[in-house]
Image (cartoon, helix red, strand yellow):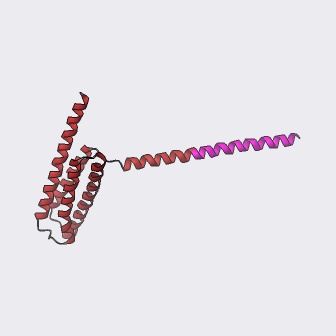
Amino acid sequence: MNGLILLADAAAESGTVRLVLEYLLYAAVIVVGILILLLLRRKTRLPRHSELRAQLGALAAELSALRKADPPRLKWLKALSRLLYNADKLIYVTDRMADKERDGEIANVSALLEQMRAELAVYRTGARAADDDGGLAAAQKKIAEAEELMQRVLARDAQLRTERSR
């Protein structure tokens, strides 16, 4: 009789341990899921206006460097492809920001970036020679206009911040 009581008692303890282990496993899965969601949120976060202006400045500097440099054709095409890729990323980001914030000026920045990309894409397809500087100059004007628009957006943000603080 005492043996049966001891066996029943051991079975109850192992069931409790098993239950605790299952709950710890569930908690670990939940914590890992939350961490993955936080990482995804951080990765897909839209940039602030000042960060976007910095990215536009970097794109303009990259375009200026491409315009001034005279590397071999293959290296020039690789640099142009990298520039087009960065322009595509900025077009996507500005388009999402314009939709989210319902901001027409940021939508105009996106449109200017698309025009700049169109000016540069003809070099990649070979429709324009690398020596022809007209498309690069037009693209540089478009990126300068986009930077000017972002500067106005930043000025507007600063004005709204001061009005809000009053």
How many marks the image carries: the answer is 0
143 with respect to 164 (left or right):
left
**Magenta stretch containing residue 18, yes or no?**
yes
Name the image quarter holding residue 131: bottom left
Name, please, the residue furthest toward the right: 1
Name the image quarter holding residue 28: top right
Name, please, the residue furthest toward the bottom: 126
The quadrant of the image that shows the N terminus is top right
Residue 68 visible in rendering = no
Residue under the point 12% across and 60% down:
138
Say above or below: 121 vs 141: below
Residue 54, image x, y percentages: 23, 47
146 with respect to 11 (left or right):
left
The quadrant of the image that shows the C terminus is top left
Tell me the chief SS of the magenta region: helix
Residue under the point 64% across and 45% down:
21
Provide the residue span drawn in magenta: 1-26
**Magenta stretch containing residue 137, yes or no?**
no
* Front residue of this view, candidates 75 and 157: 157
Name, please, the residue furthest toward the top: 166
Residue 23 visible in rendering = yes
Residue under the point 55% across and 48% down:
29
125 with respect to 21 (left or right):
left
Residue 107, image x, y percentages: 23, 51
Residue under the point 62% across and 44% down:
23
* Front residue of this view, candidates 26 and 81: 26
